[in-house]
Image (spheres, rainbow, N blue to C red):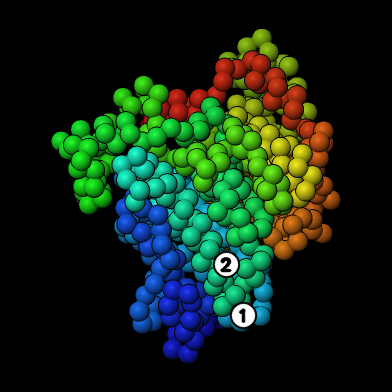
Amino acid sequence: MMKTFRYDDVPVLETTSGRLKGYFYDGQYIFKGVPYAQAERFQMPAPSHWEGVKDAASYGFVCPLMAQDTPSAELLVPHRYWPMDEHCQNLNIWTQALEPGAKKPVIVWLHGGGYFAGSSIEQVAYDGANMCREGDVVVVSVNHRLNILGYLDLSPFGEKYRNSGNAGHADLVAALQWVHDNIALFGGDPENVTIFGQSGGGMKVADLMQTPAADGLFHKGLIMSGIADAGLMPSCEGGGEKIVEAMLAELGLDVKDVEKLETLPYPELVRAYTKAMPAVAAAGGYVGGAPQVNDWFLGNPLQHGLRERACDIPLMVGSVFGEFFSFAPSGFDKTALKPEEAAAIVGKVYGEHTQEALAAFAKAYPGKNPTDLLVLDRVMRRPSKKLAAMHARGRKAGTYLYNFTLEFPIAHKIAWHCADIPFFFHNTDKVEVCSIPGVAEKLEEQIFGAFMRFAKTGAPAQAGLPEWLPVTEGSEPTMIFDRECRLCYNYDDELLNLIDSVLPPFDLMAMMAEMNVQH
């Protein structure tokens, strides 16, 4: 059936920034590239304003990257690339009704890519149309400043640079403020906003829970593979004097010339930072690259404690079975291995502890191949459990844990970093590898349905899943998302404790470097 497109009769909306016109397609109104703020380099965002009618039919600029993206593993995580410019404070909206009284739940997506890369449209699975339609919600996705544009402290060099170490997160607060002030025009309820993100986007959700300026601008949070302890993402503390002075020296400039950093071409700024950073970091100095801990941002909750206000926010938090490990080639067909052959492969890593490890793994993950133990996540699951326990101790709002453990029909890989995103967005139809007959459609409805229920009520209970109970002190129910979903209690404590006692601490950077050498 032919889908309907309309533009000419779509009404112009009077937002706080100016008049805005989107378009209608396939049952929903779509607004792309809406400027929510404006800012000069290294300075705080100010509310956006434009004259005339702003046409919102094209995606806006995304933040410039410090290094060229190289497409790879596109079957696992298909991407989209887009023109870049540092004036990238824009958002996209999908809605089924332009009625201020509709009061539909609002879902705001914060993209991944750490604090240095990514965009609101980077992955094909980020499209908000299906979520809007199937969930009857208003969907928003946000671009903001990243890397040295968003997270480099110049505050010691002038008041106009105040809090520049958090400029990227200040953009996010500005976006949420714009949503709060305007989303009713798009049929959304400004008092029912859920923020969610994966990887770096999940970190941003946790960060905003620790940011007083964001209080009241969102009401629920979903963190997907986005909780990291100090070993993976150390706290960004200190001031920018050393790194900025070192950059100026690389550029042949004096401290009195600091304002020239505002107008230098971005590639020159990147080259100076890239040359200066290693020595400053080696000396233990602040180098930016992540939100700066100060009175505006109170720091990663695992390292600085979860503030009381954050416990008022219902929270879903989860990870996937393989995370980063599943990108590494296995070098063997696990389905063709005899039990003793599988044990021998595992034994190369676990040595004298092999049988004990295999027994604990089989108990935690019945039905999985023994060699899957070698790709089990050691990055996100443990910190996710810690945050959930911390949040649950507040005894104010529900805390819900999940683990996505589906095996896909590509080299028998189990869920890798980003593999759950299409299911939460109801976009498995857009990601080829998700096309698993008899499995994907059912699992998508279970995951998506739970998320939409959470966004609407603060609890992810739904008829298609076992009863999903919240985490409490001493009790850690985790919803296992797989071919058959089940709720398991503290099911992997023994396994994780054993792994940590046998294997050296996990070093993601070393693993990524090794993978680069292999490729």
* Residue indicated by mark 1: 100
Name the residue nearer the viewer: 305 or 362.
Answer: 305
Which residue is pictured at 74% across the width and 30% down the height?
492
The answer, for residue 181, to whether it is visible in the render is: yes
Q: Is residue 464 above or below residue 303?
A: below
Which residue is pictured at 77% across the width and 39% down the height?
393
Q: Quadrant of the C terminus?
A: top left
Residue 121 bears which disc, if any? Answer: none
Q: Quadrant of the N terminus?
A: bottom right
- Give coordinates of residue 300: x percent, y percent: 57, 38
Which residue is pictured at 45% across the width and 28% down the height?
509
Depth check, mark 2 against mark 1: the one in front is 2
- The residue furthest front is 159
* Residue indicated by mark 2: 180
Locate residue 54: give its quadrant.
bottom left
Locate residue 499: give its quadrant.
top right
At label 2, the amino acid type is His
Q: Secondary structure at mark 2?
A: helix
**Left/right of residue 452 with respect to residue 201 in the rendered view:** right
